Image (cartoon, rainbow, N blue to C red):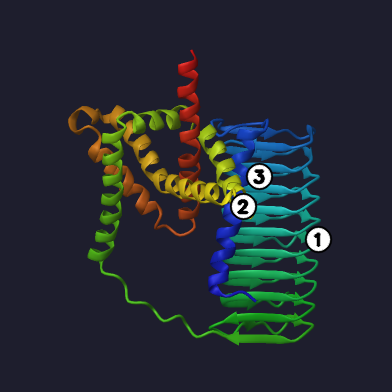
């Protein structure tokens, strides 16, 4: 059974996994599209044998993919057949086709109207499993609201503010929610275990084959809201601290920030791809180094450098944004980029405050911060060799 804290952890975990996989694939492997493309379609009748990856503003997979499939965009529709696992992240995700494998989906709105032979993992604002859908194994979903009208062969694990069940669950249902509604058509073959501050609304026609266990959770005591002045002060303090670091490094190494900013501007997705590798491999390398006595000092140096660049990442992205603003409004000559960097840092701090979105923004910033220095160093070496 999931608590509200576990609910947030599930959402964060699913978004991290989806974001890492979806961003790294088009950079490190051959792709059938890219994020600069407005439309990417796998037509009906077309077949991709092996890894399928589709990235564009609008993605429509109407054909067949015989392999694991990765896709991302503003709107993604899967209308064909995927013979393998499906990883998808978009603002709007619609899965109408047959998925012979697991589904890992994250988006603002996710709707499944088809069959999946494996497990299904969903995270988003609104999650809908339509009446005509069938899930071959377990369903794990976390979001703001969940509508389950289809058939789940095994267990349902759900965490959301509002959950409505009008479909069939083959075994137990483990739920954490504020509002749980079982419609007259709802069938839970096993037990219903739920944690909530409110008792579930169970229609007279609903069927629960096992026992019903309601764990009452007292409503969370509302914390005293921080004053607007304090929120503004904390934001400005973080921006000021980052500005001091930016200024010191600018004086020590004048070409540092401009070089990193140019690298991000020229190779944004490549920087993210390299950053993904560093993000994943550095902790593993740290553990391996710590196993041996000789490697312990190197391990601490590596993890310290890793943390330093994670902190500097937001400054790198702010410098990149400052460069774009300077070109558009000709600000560089007026105040040498000081206010544009501060403005971009403030914008990032505000984005970090937005639930769920903050995870994606932080990961993108972290990946860029870890990848851009490596690409910049490599470019400098190539210039020296020439």
Pick the residue in front: 278 or 204.
278
Q: Residues within 10 Å of mark 1 (few under 14, many from 20)?
A: many
| Residue 125 appears anywhere in the view | no
| Left or right: where 20 falls relative to 84 | left
Indicate the secondary structure of the residue bearing disc 2: helix
- Rendered view: 297 above or below 327: below
1 or 3: tag closer to the N-terminus: 3
Instruction: Count up the numbered dots.
Output: 3
- Labelled disc at residue 97: none
Give coordinates of residue 315: x percent, y percent: 36, 42
Residue highlighted by disc 2: 17
Pick the residue in front: 145 or 278.
278
- Rendered view: 367 above or below 185: above
2 or 3: tag closer to the N-terminus: 2
**Which marked residue is nearer to the observer: mark 2 or mark 3?**
2
Q: In terms of image quadrants, where is residue 320?
A: top left
| Residue 371 appears anywhere in the view | yes
Measure how far apart labels 2 and 3 are at the Cα level: 20 Å
Pick the residue in front: 381 or 65.
381
Residue most toward the left?
Answer: 334
The answer to whether mark 1 and mark 2 are in CB contact below 8 A is no
The answer to whether mark 2 and mark 3 are in CB contact below 8 A is no
**Which marked residue is nearer to the observer: mark 1 or mark 3?**
1
Residue highlighted by disc 1: 136
């Amino acid at each position: 059974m999931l608590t509200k804290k576990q609910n947030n952890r599930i959402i964060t975990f699913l978004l991290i996994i989806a974001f890492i996989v979806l961003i790294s694939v088009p950079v490190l492997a051959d792709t059938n599209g890219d994020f600069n493309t407005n439309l990417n379609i796998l037509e009906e009748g077309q077949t991709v044998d092996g890894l399928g990856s589709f990235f564009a503003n609008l993605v429509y997979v109407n054909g067949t993919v015989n392999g694991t499939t990765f896709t991302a965009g503003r709107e993604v529709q899967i209308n064909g057949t995927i013979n393998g696992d499906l990883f998808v992240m978009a603002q709007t995700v619609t899965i109408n086709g047959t998925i012979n494998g697991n589904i890992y989906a994250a988006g603002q709105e996710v709707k499944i109207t088809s069959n999946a032979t494996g497990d299904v993992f969903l995270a988003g604002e609104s999650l809908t499993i339509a009446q005509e859908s069938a899930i071959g194994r377990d369903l794990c979903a976390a979001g703001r609201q969940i509508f389950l009208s289809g058939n789940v062969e095994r267990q349902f694990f759900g965490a959301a503010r509002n959950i409505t069940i009008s479909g069939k669950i083959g075994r137990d249902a483990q739920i954490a929610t504020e509002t749980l509604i079982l419609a007259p058509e709802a069938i839970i073959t096993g037990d219903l275990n739920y944690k909530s501050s409110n008792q579930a609304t169970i229609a007279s026609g609903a069927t629960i084959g096992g026992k019903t266990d309601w764990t009452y959770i007292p409503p969370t005591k509302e914390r005293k809201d921080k004053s607007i002045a304090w929120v503004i002060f904390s934001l400005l303090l973080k921006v000021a601290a980052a500005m001091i670091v930016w200024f010191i490094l600018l004086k020590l190494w004048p070409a540092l920030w401009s070089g990193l900013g140019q690298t991000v501007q020229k190779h944004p997705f490549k920087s993210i791809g390299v950053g993904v590798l560093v993000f994943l491999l550095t902790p593993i390398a740290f553990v391996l180094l710590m196993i041996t006595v000789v490697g312990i000092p190197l391990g601490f140096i590596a993890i310290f450098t890793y943390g330093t660049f994670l902190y500097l990442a937001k400054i790198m992205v702010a410098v990149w944004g400052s460069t774009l603003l300077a070109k558009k409004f000709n600000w560089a000559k007026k105040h040498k980029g000081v206010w544009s960097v501060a403005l971009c840092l403030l914008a990032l701090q505000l984005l970090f405050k937005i639930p769920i979105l903050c995870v994606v923004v932080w990961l993108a910033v972290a990946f860029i911060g870890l990848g851009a220095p490596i690409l910049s160093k490599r470019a400098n070496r190539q210039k020296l060799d020439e």
